[in-house]
Image (spheres, rainbow, N blue to C red):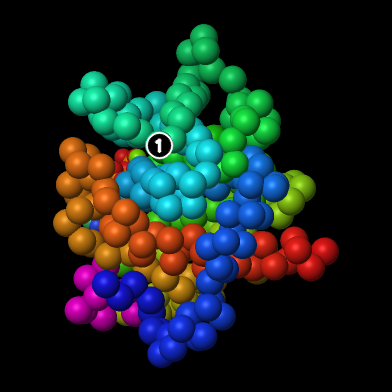
Amino acid sequence: MSNWRHKPQTDDELNELVVPVKQIIRWLKTRRGFIIGVGILKGGTGKSTSVLYLALYCALVLNLDVAVVDTDDNSQSISRWYAQHLAMGDTIPFTLIEHPTKGKDAISLKKRLRSLRDQHDVVIVDLGGGDKETFIDLCEQARLLLMPSAPSGWETDRIQATLQTASKAARINQDGLDVYNFFVKCDFTSTLAEEEREAMAVDLSEEDEDFVPPPFLHPYFDISKAPHHIRAWSFIPKRGELEEWGLLVRHAMKGIIEEDEAA
Ligand SMILES: Nc1ncnc2c1ncn2[C@@H]1O[C@H](COP(=O)(O)OP(=O)(O)OP(=O)(O)O)[C@@H](O)[C@H]1O
Ligand SMILES: [Mg+2]
């Protein structure tokens, strides 16, 4: 499986790009409550599937205590996936937290995340595609925002608006927010991802002057459209199927960890 855009030729080159597994585990365990948001202001791009793989990678491969927060009142995909697998007797290696955004049990995402911070090593938040208010709340709290979309103008069309909203909200984020925008559902035998990345660069360069880009935008690893992603609704992905997600996480976290350790 080749999910890198400029394939490193040697192990040394790869290690330059990603944080070592041992370092990421040590850092996350010491720090606790690291918040990763998965969101883009568009439905159906692959957010919940990404949340599932990220949570499984962190729990099964990194052996971390992981919570997943489902903020999506409409589809509730992760909650429904969770309930279904519990009923099937599967062992699910992360804790699910349902976060209704409406109704009598609703509390702000800020309050929810504050109460979760010291209880888990990593908190991964699944955002609905349309709920801007929750998205803004998340951008104020999270350290990392992962923004998945397919390499298609139908989906990347919303990236500019999402980045604008994220960067505005990130201004009051005390730790700073890094945004990692990547493609899922990639067919690595075609050049779709490269074509789309080029089209996006042109779109973003034409943005109005008052657009302040998010602090950190460094896509490098993309995710395949391997069929296990689609089957994951019924079959919990296997360890080997999590590896491409591991590279993505280790790449997205490298700058954050190095900056923190240097401080
Ligand atoms: N890497 C992938 N490869 C192939 N198909 C994928 C991949 N990721 C997601 N999909 C498919 O894309 C569809 C949408 O995925 P998903 O439900 O994760 O999106 P979402 O952004 O959470 O949607 P919503 O906005 O409704 O919450 C599903 O059919 C899913 O199986
Ligand atoms: Mg979803």
* Residue 129 in view, yes or no: yes
Query: Where is residue 126 shown, x and y percent of the image?
Result: 44, 40
What residue sits 44% from the left and 29% below the top?
Answer: 96
Kind of residue sitting beneath label 1:
Pro
Q: Quadrant of the C terminus?
A: bottom right
Specify the farthest residue to the bottom: 9
Q: Residues within 10 Å of mark 1 (few under 14, many from 20)?
A: some
89 relative to 76 in the view: left or right: left
Q: Mark 1 — residue?
A: 93
Query: Where is residue 235 shown, x and y percent of the image?
Result: 20, 42
Query: 242 or 204: nearer the eye?
Result: 242
State yes or no: residue 190 in magenta.
Answer: yes
| Above-or-below relation of 97 to 137 | above
Q: Quadrant of the N terminus?
A: bottom left
Query: Where is residue 112 shown, x and y percent of the image?
Result: 61, 26
What residue sits 52% from the left and 12% below the top?
Answer: 105
| Above-or-below relation of 82 to 259 | above
What residue sits 52% from the left and 44% below the top?
Answer: 64
Quarter location, residue 197? bottom left
Query: Where is residue 57 shown, x and y percent of the image?
Result: 41, 51
* Residue 185 in view, yes or no: no
Where ligand 2 lies, by quadrant?
A: top left
The segment highlighted magenta reads 185-194
State yes or no: residue 35 in magenta.
Answer: no
Query: Does the magenta stretch mainly form a helix, a strand or a loop?
Result: loop
Query: 139 or 33: nearer the eye?
Result: 33
Query: 240 or 159: nearer the eye?
Result: 240
